[in-house]
């Protein structure tokens, strides 16, 4: 459409890149997406490219949308398995719970304790994204620990990434495990846990000379020197507290995973992150905007039905599920709000009072039609640009108005719920809105 469809019909290359399509849709919908990442390319086979090219040239929106539906389903269902390992008492299980947005006493939380509580690899699905599984692995601190047999025991090949956790110094066991993981071409990340405990202890011991920055730097340097002494070259260590992921190095860990995970798995990781900072909310919003063109094309090209009061057709069921997913991704559902209110000791009504958009349970097909009607007021002039610039698209161009209306509705909704999520976070944590 406008730029994206022309580029695909006339000069489709060896790769279908999300960024180039977003730039085309930016002109179509007036969205300012220039700040979004330029990464994330889905590679297609030559046969798939030829099929897409033919569909575009023939004006076959249904054919294009069918292929894009497969891509969308793959994006939303990709499995991400993260293995959490370390020595007994290092806080593995608490880290598992924190990544899932749970406290240690919440229903469904991983069992925690000062002695080893994990005997076998134990999977914990994310409460909102069942395709994301965090595995609590047995401890590595036993005298007879051998990294090769340990990895075989826990089913090494099953995990996409590993977090190697220590609450004090990283030992020869940690280093040996890391080398074996690396040798098998898997990614691992060193996490130094319980830094809040160290900071509190340092403050008690040296209140007059206490420096949080100084203590954290000392911990980091000690970890790096210990790993280097064990033969780990250029190690990177992330300092965390499972009881407050918004502090210390969690944002650096998230950014590192964004760079190193594949596009699909990076999307799964971002959406599953707990909503603990304004930075994470912005990342989620960008991820939603990034694949919105996929949703719009699929909704207008497959099982589309006429919308009363508008000269468009789309699949309202798909759009309703998508809006519900946006709400849940931002924690704007009853379960998430009630959990947040309980954690912060605030009435849930105070959280809901700052929300202006519908909650997840309030999303219905009727509401979707209302939102489409609102978006439709500006869509005709956008669609006219598409029709005038894409003479070869035939029936595909006839769907320009449907696409423009749907895309504008989705974008407006995401902007609104993202703003709501920010207000909820600021209310809950008394944050500075500029952070």
Image (spheres, grey):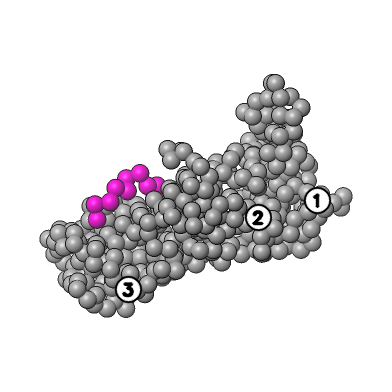
Where is 414 relative to 239, above or below? below
Residue 410 is tagged as none
> Which of the two discs, 3 and 1, labels the residue nearer the N terminus?
1
* Residue at 59% across, 51% down: 345
Mark 2 → mark 1, Cα distance in angstroms: 16 Å
Q: Is residue 38 magenta?
A: yes
Total numbered labels placed on residues in the image:
3
Tell me the residue that label 2 is attached to: 103
Q: Residues within 10 Å of mark 2 (few under 14, many from 20)?
A: many
Binning the other alpha carbons within 10 Å of mark 3 as few (below 14), some (14 to 19) or many (20 upward) gives few
Say whether residue 210 is visible: yes
Circle 1 residues within 10 Å: few <14, some 14–19, many ≥20 = few
- 183 lies above or below 10: above
Q: Nearer the viewer, residue 362 or 30?
A: 362
SS at badge 2: loop
Q: Quadrant of residue 16?
A: bottom left
| Disc number placed over residue 366 in the picture, else none | 3
Question: In the rendering, which numbered label is found on residue 114?
Answer: 1
Are discs 2 and 3 less than 8 Å apart at CB? no
Measuring from the top left, give residue 330's x and y in whole percent.
Answer: 46, 56
- Measured in 3D between alpha carbons, the distance from the residue under mark 2 to the one under mark 3, in whole angstroms, is 37 Å
Marks 2 and 1, the one that precedes in the sequence: 2
Look at 76% across and 38% down and name the residue there.
Answer: 169
Furthest-top residue in view?
Answer: 208
Span highlighted in magenta in the image: 29-39
- Verify whether residue 64 appears in magenta: no
Tag 3 or tag 2, which sits nearer the N-term? Answer: 2
**SS for dot 3:** helix
């Amino acid at each position: 459409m406008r730029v994206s469809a022309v580029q695909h019909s006339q000069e489709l290359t060896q790769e279908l890149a999300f960024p180039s399509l977003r730039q085309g849709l930016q002109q179509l919908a007036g969205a300012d997406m220039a700040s979004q990442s330029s990464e994330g390319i889905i590679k297609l086979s030559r046969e798939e490219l030829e099929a897409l090219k033919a569909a575009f040239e023939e004006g076959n929106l249904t054919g294009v949308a069918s292929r894009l539906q497969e891509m969308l389903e793959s994006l939303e269902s990709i499995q991400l398995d993260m293995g959490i390992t370390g020595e007994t008492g290092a806080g593995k299980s608490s880290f598992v719970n924190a990544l899932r947005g749970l406290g240690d006493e919440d229903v469904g939380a991983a069992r925690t304790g000062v002695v080893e509580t994990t005997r076998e690899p134990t999977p914990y699905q994310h409460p909102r994204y069942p395709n994301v599984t965090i595995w609590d692995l047995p401890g590595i601190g036993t005298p007879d620990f051998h990294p090769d047999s340990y990895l075989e025991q826990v089913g090494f090949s099953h995990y996409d990434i590993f977090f190697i956790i220590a609450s004090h110094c990283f030992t020869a066991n940690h280093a040996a495990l890391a080398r074996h993981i690396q040798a098998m071409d898997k990614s691992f990340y060193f996490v130094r846990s319980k830094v809040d405990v160290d900071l509190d202890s340092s403050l008690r011991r040296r209140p007059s000379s206490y420096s949080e920055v100084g203590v954290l730097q000392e911990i980091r340097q000690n970890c790096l020197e210990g790993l280097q002494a064990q033969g780990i070259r250029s190690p990177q260590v992330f300092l965390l507290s499972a009881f407050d992921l918004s502090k210390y190095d969690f944002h650096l860990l998230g950014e590192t995973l964004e760079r190193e995970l594949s596009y699909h798995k990076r999307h799964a990781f971002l959406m599953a992150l707990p909503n603990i900072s304004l930075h994470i909310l912005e990342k989620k919003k960008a991820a939603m905007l990034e694949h919105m063109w996929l949703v719009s094309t699929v909704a207008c090209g497959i099982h589309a039905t006429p919308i009363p009061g508008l000269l468009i057709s789309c699949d309202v069921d798909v759009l309703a599920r998508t809006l519900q997913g946006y709400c849940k991704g931002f924690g704007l559902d009853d379960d998430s709000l009630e959990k947040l209110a309980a954690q912060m000791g605030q009435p849930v009504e105070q959280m809901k009072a700052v929300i202006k958009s519908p909650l997840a349970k309030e999303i219905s097909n009727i509401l979707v039609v209302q939102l489409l009607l609102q978006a439709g007021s500006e869509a005709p002039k956008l669609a006219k640009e598409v029709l005038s610039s894409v003479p070869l698209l035939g029936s595909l161009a006839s769907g320009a108005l449907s696409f423009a209306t749907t895309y504008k509705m989705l974008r407006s909704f995401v902007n609104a719920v993202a703003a709501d999520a920010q207000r909820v976070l600021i209310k809950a944590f008394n944050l500075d809105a500029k952070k």
